[in-house]
Image: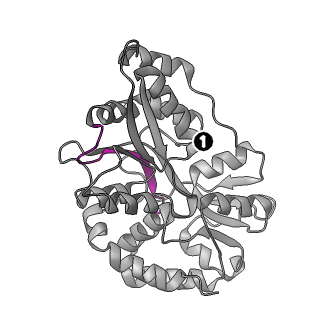
Amino acid sequence: MKAPALCSVALAFMAALMGGCGGQRESTVIVYCAQDQVFAEPLLAEFTRQTGIKARAVFDSEAVKTVGLANRLLAEKDHPQCDVFWGNEELRTRQLAAQGVFRATNGFTMFGFRSRRIVINTNKVSLAEAPRALAELTNAAWRGKVALAYPMFGTTATHFLALRQRWRDAAWQQWCRALQANKPFLVDGNSVVLKLVGQGEAWIGLTDSDDIAGGIREGLPLAAMPQTSETLLIPNTVAVVRGAPHASEAERLFQFLQRPEVAECLVKEAALEGTQAGQSQGLQVDWEALLHDLDAGTVVMRDIFLRRE
């Protein structure tokens, strides 16, 4: 996938607001970034162009995206190496905040959103017969035809844990076990889900709206099912690490990523679905309770979905 073009008009306006970089000393900000590299790099380059601050980004593999970076931040908590964490989902950011990884005041914020959707291959499944509810993914008709990323990582993990809260543990475990018994493709990341569905190897997938949008843009025979009360809305997050080595530069990037023009650029490139998530849409998550039960839910998912080959 080639890098997206910058939203030149919006970003030029941002440059005027932030001021030029003439005469500034060379400085650096270290970013641990879970947003896809193809979308993040142009914006970080624009930040550097406007401010003179070199943004050095550390990205992660899709298979463990966000979880890998979160573990690294936890390991470095007492000797921070990172200044800013740019997350692509809410749970791990809240988990890190609860463990004191971010500064105490104005530690993190959220912007824009994606969503978790059921996606179908329209050459294999008609819109009339396509599943709308997650419970339908356990139907015998879809045995061996559903693809999803391993639920221990990324947005799949967050979605499953939010469903556990909504449905309560017993009903949720029953659904998880029925889903696993229906022989789904369990793969390393949402882009792999999209690839399998786009090629028709799987007929149905559970993935993120940005992956679906990218597949449709490439001409794959895909359609996303509408949002429901089971849909997880997924904001981007940005946080400043407690004890950041480059505190003033971190604050500049923190403010930059919150500008509406950044979210608008990401929406234009389909990295985000919208700039603001409606409060009544999708799953309503009690994040404090979810974090309290995080380990218990993760253990159950690992037991049900762990690869045993």
Outermost front residue: 25
Q: Residue at x 53, y 17 (%)?
A: 9
User: Percent position (x, y) of residue 251?
Assistant: 29, 34
Assess whether residue 88 is covered by the magenta stretch: no
With respect to residue 94, does 240 lie above or below?
A: above
Q: Is residue 131 left or right of residue 123?
A: left
The boundaries of the magenta stretch are: 230-246
Quadrant placement of the N terminus: top right
Is residue 57 something one can see in this rendering?
yes
For the residue marked with disc 1, what is the amino acid? Val
User: Percent position (x, y) of residue 124?
Assistant: 79, 64
**Residue 120 or 35: which is nearer the viewer?**
35
Query: Can you tell which quarter of the image residue 181 is in?
Result: bottom right
Residue tagged 1:
38
Is residue 121 something one can see in this rendering?
no
Label total for image: 1
User: Percent position (x, y) of residue 11?
Assistant: 49, 22
**Residue 216 or 122: which is nearer the viewer?**
216
**Residue 302 or 129: which is nearer the viewer?**
302
With respect to residue 54, does 60 lie above or below?
A: below
Outermost left residue: 105
Q: Residue at x 27, y 54 (%)?
A: 79
Q: Callout 1: few (<14), some (14-19), or many (20+) C-alpha neighbours within 10 Å? A: few
How is this picture coloured? Answer: one colour
Q: Is residue 285 left or right of residue 215?
A: left
Q: Residue at x 75, y 61 (%)?
A: 126
Assess whether residue 238 is covered by the magenta stretch: yes
Quadrant placement of the C terminus: bottom right
User: Percent position (x, y) of residue 254?
Assistant: 34, 36
Q: Secondary structure at mark 1?
A: helix
